[in-house]
Structure formats: structure tokens, C-alpha cells
Amino acid sequence: MESGLMTVLEPLDRERTDRYFLNISVCDQGLPPMASWRMLTVVIEDANDNDPQFLQSRYSAVVSEDAAIGLEVLTVGAFDKDVGPNGQLSYTLLTDVPQFGVHRETGGVFVSAGLDREASPTFLLKVEARDQAERGAQRWAVATLSVTIGDVNDCAPVFVPASYSARVPEDFPPGAVVTWVQGQDPDLGLGGQVRYSLVNDFNGTFEVVDVSENLYAPSFSDFAVRGSVKENSRVGTSVAAAVATDRDAGRDGALRYAIAGGSSAFSIDEETAPPPPSQHLSSITAPPPLSQHLSSVTAPPPPSQHLLLHHSTSSSITAPLLCHSTSSSITAPPPPSQHLLLHHSTSPLSQHLLRHSTYSSSITAPPAS
């Protein structure tokens, strides 16, 4: 190199190497040649080649609806690898809402107006961070802030409609309903539960009864229930017990069960939960000898009917009692609290008489005539 002009041979990146130290030497063409050297420091100046970056792309926060104006909710921090004005950031709230603002220099999001959860329970805010480059185009980045407004008991119940009127005859019986009133409260939780009372009952002439106390949803004791049954099990075999409870009282706490989906091969008692395994009707046995007081129940089953006796006092499963009869009467000893159920069918094995008892009982069929 004769001119001493120094050029760049590879791309430079100030963020990786901001300066270079070069040893420059020069020599003449004499004999013997003479030389000299100097140290040259090359400083790389910054160019605005980096976008701002947020620490997170999405932020979330919860603030109470009674928060004071000026309360800082969250700071959305960002950085820029550039230096000088190229790396200085300013923050702007892109979402045009009066309830929130952002500090231009720090990125702190604050409450700028009163909050009302009943009117606006959530906010989705977009915050921009932009560098302050003086030459060339400025660069920016955007982050999202989700703000959930927490509820406070700040709303009074209101009647719908606001006033009621009713007429009753003077011979109206005690306990008869005069009218229905309904109140609403938009608050959540206990703050939104409404209770009714009479300010003036005219010396006990009237009373108000709360009929909207169904406050709790039913819940199962277990998230999942597992049961097993053999493939050759008879229809009616108990598989599992799925027990739910409801903290409401009276009719509000009465439960009705149903199988929502899965298979039509199973059924569930819709009014009461299945009993625990220790109480399952798990024994099908022959009746004991006729040693009890008998009362007669007659029915006209066809010759192909069968009787199935189900006892709940045993813990083993044996073959069912099949009584073939051509007689037109069946004698059995059901106490007053027991139930006798007769099913008709044309199938030889589908006619069953199911009898539930908590003690020994018997069913006898007279001999064929």
C-alpha cells in the first residue's frame, strides 16, 4: 500500500465491538530500510440499527376499582442496544382510554381517572416504546397490557321495577302470596347477594320470604370417578358411585343426576346419588324357606315371565331366582314399606320382578296346574 489509505474490509457492528486498536507501520526503500510505527485507535460510531425491545411482549395486572388516581399499576420496561438518542426511549399509550396513562420516560402505567368495574371490567392497553434518533427513521416496539378491574361493594341493590302495587281481599288466607319483588346488585360475590326484609310489616301483618337463595352450584366430591364392571355382568349391576353436594337448602339443594355423554350402555339414578359400595345391592339369592307371615299379591303374568329377587343384605353375587310358572297368581310377602314391580316383555329372559328388601323375604309360585 503506497498511499496509506485505510479502508473497511468487513461489516462493523458497534454493539459487538465499539473500537479497534491498530498498529500502523511505515518503512522507506533505502538500504538499509528504515521504519517507524504508531498505534491507531478506531472508534465505531453508533447507527440506529436496533429496534427497542420489551422485557415481555404481554403484561397483565389487577387493580381495584376504588384505586386512587395516580396509582401506578405496572411498569412496562424496554431497552435499546443503541446509544445516545438512538437508544433513548419514550413511552406512549396507544389505546385511547381516559382511565389510564403512561409515564413518558419510565414506562409506568398509572390510573388517570375513576374506575368502574360494572361499566368496564377489563382493559386491553397497547404501549409503544420509541427511540429518539435525530438522524434517519426512528424505531419502535409495542407491548400489550391486560388490566383486570377488581370488584368492591360500591353498588346498592335496586328493585326491578322500582315500585310495586298489589290488591288483596280482606279474607285473604295467611301464607298466601301477595306479590313477587325482585332486586339486583351488579357487585360480585357476597357484595352482589341480595336479602329481602320489610321496613314496615304493619305489626306482623305481612312478611317477606326470600325465594332466590340458589347461590351455589352443585359440586362432585371427586374430579373423576373410576369404575369397572365385567363384560358378562347383568343389566342393573352397580358400577360406581358419583356423589355430588349442594350447599343450598331445600329445593335449591335438591340434585338431579344425568349422564351428559359417553355411552348409552349405562344409566344413572337421576334423583338420588348411587349408594356407596358398601350399600350397593350386590346379592341376588334364592328366597329363604316360607317361615314368615305371608300376605298375598296376585298378578297375571304370561307363562314366559320370570321373577328376580334382589336382596341388599348380602355382599356376594349369585345366580338370580328364575321361577317359571303357568299359574295366573304369584304369592309374595311384601311388607308395607317394600315395593313390588312387574315388567312385561316378549323376550324369554327380559321379564323380571325386582324386589328390594333390607331383610330376608320369600317369593313362592304355586305348582303348575
Image: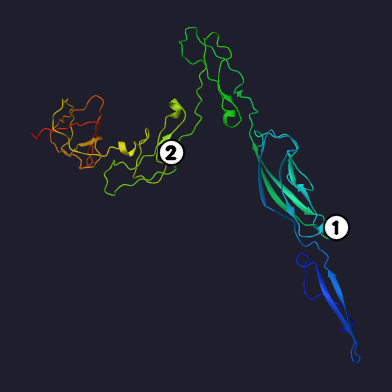
Element under label 1?
A: loop
Residue 158 coordinates in the image, percent (x, y): 61, 23
Report whether 304 appears left or right of 205. Answer: left
Q: Is residue 313 above or below residue 224?
A: above
Residue 134 coordinates in the image, percent (x, y): 85, 57
Q: Which residue is drawn at 73% across and 53% down?
A: 78
Tell me the number on the disc at residue 153: none
Q: In this view, does 50 lie above or below 208?
A: below
- Farthest-out residue, left: 369
Which of the 4 image quadrants contains residue 354? Answer: top left
Nearer the observer, disc 1 or disc 2? Answer: 2
The tag earlier along the polypeptide, 1 or 2, is: 1
Residue 208 coordinates in the image, percent (x, y): 52, 17
Q: Report which residue position mark 1 lands on.
A: 134
Q: In this view, does 229 lie above or below 154?
A: below
Q: Report which residue position mark 2 lands on.
A: 221
